[in-house]
Amino acid sequence: MKKIFILFALALSIFIFSCTKDEEGYGVKNYYGSFSAELLALPGATTLDIYVGGEKIDTLAAGRIIGNDIPKRLTAGEATTISFKKAGTDSLVLDTTITVGAAEKVALKIAYSPTLGINTFSKVSDANVADDSTSFFLFNGVPDDAIAGAIKTDAYLLKWNSESSLFEETGIIWTDLEKRKLHPNLVTVRATKDDGSSIIYVIKLKNKATGEFITDGIGSEYFSIYIEAGKREIITLNALDLGGGLWFFLPDYAIY
């Protein structure tokens, strides 16, 4: 009888320990899913507050992702509303209701730009782009302190030639690149060579009045752009304030 009692006590302790492990999160995968959220760095995008079921849980800045390093948990099997509002306000930008399974993760990608009139959940790419190519639009977001608004410009795309060690013109030109406007031309270029190595591109702005290329505060004519094979992007020409009236050409980009 004593032996049976000891075995019963041992089984009970194992059961209690198992329940405790679940409560501490070891068994969490049986009850929860999660989500991540990314706000694309589109022109005019501003920080958003994130609400789950009406409760604010985090903020999301343009070009950032939350929920990858530290999962944002959702109860599995329950329909949950996730809302995105302009930071510090009750102004709703987007919301969605999702139901996740146990251990399932849903990735939300937000394309929000009052400047461009975009306000939607986006896939990584909605275009049919070849695996070795990239399609992109160009947006002129260079501050007026870096290039005066009165200066009219054309943009030139150049490609690095490893044999000559020079950037060479591709023949692609965005004429009349107006400030704070998305140029209407969608450009598609090869992103990788046949051997899989990356092709390096830069953009230069030419002053239409003088015919000269414009330099930044450190004397560079180049906007070094990032392109990703198989994707569609918006590349924003921008400049970083180095202080003392010096500006450094530094573009932004977003996959949408």
Image (tube, rainbow, N blue to C red):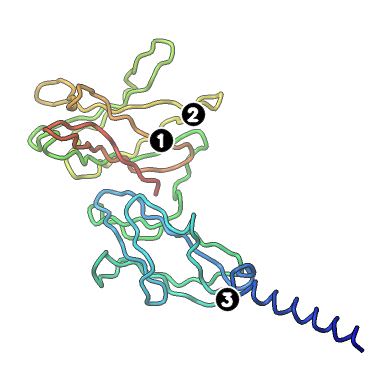
- Residue 33 % position (x, y): 56, 67
User: What's under tag 2, amino acid-wise?
Assistant: Thr
Q: Can you say whether 107 is above or below 219 in the image?
A: below
Task: Give 76 or 118, whichever is nearer the viewer.
Answer: 76
- Residue 199 % position (x, y): 44, 26
Q: What number is the disc on residue 77?
A: 3
Q: Quadrant of residue 155?
A: top left
The residue under the point 43% across, 15% down is 162
Point out the image quarter for the N terminus: bottom right
**2 relative position to 211: left or right:** right
Calculate the distance from the C-alpha at mark 2 to the C-alpha at mark 1: 10 Å
Q: Can you say whether 212 is above or below 129 in the image?
A: above
Neighbor class of circle 1 (other Cα within 10 Å; few <14, some 14-19, many 20+) is many
Q: Quadrant of residue 4?
A: bottom right
User: What's under tag 3, amino acid-wise?
Assistant: Gly
Q: Farthest left residue? A: 150
**195 relative position to 62: left or right:** right
Name the residue that disc number 2 marks: 192
Neighbor class of circle 3 (other Cα within 10 Å; few <14, some 14-19, many 20+) is some
**156 relative position to 103: left or right:** left
Q: What number is the disc on residue 227?
A: 1
Q: Quadrant of residue 123?
A: bottom left
Task: Give 205 or 130, whichever is nearer the viewer.
Answer: 205
Q: Farthest front residue? A: 2
User: What's under tag 1, amino acid-wise?
Assistant: Ile
Calculate the distance from the C-alpha at mark 1 to the C-alpha at mark 3: 39 Å
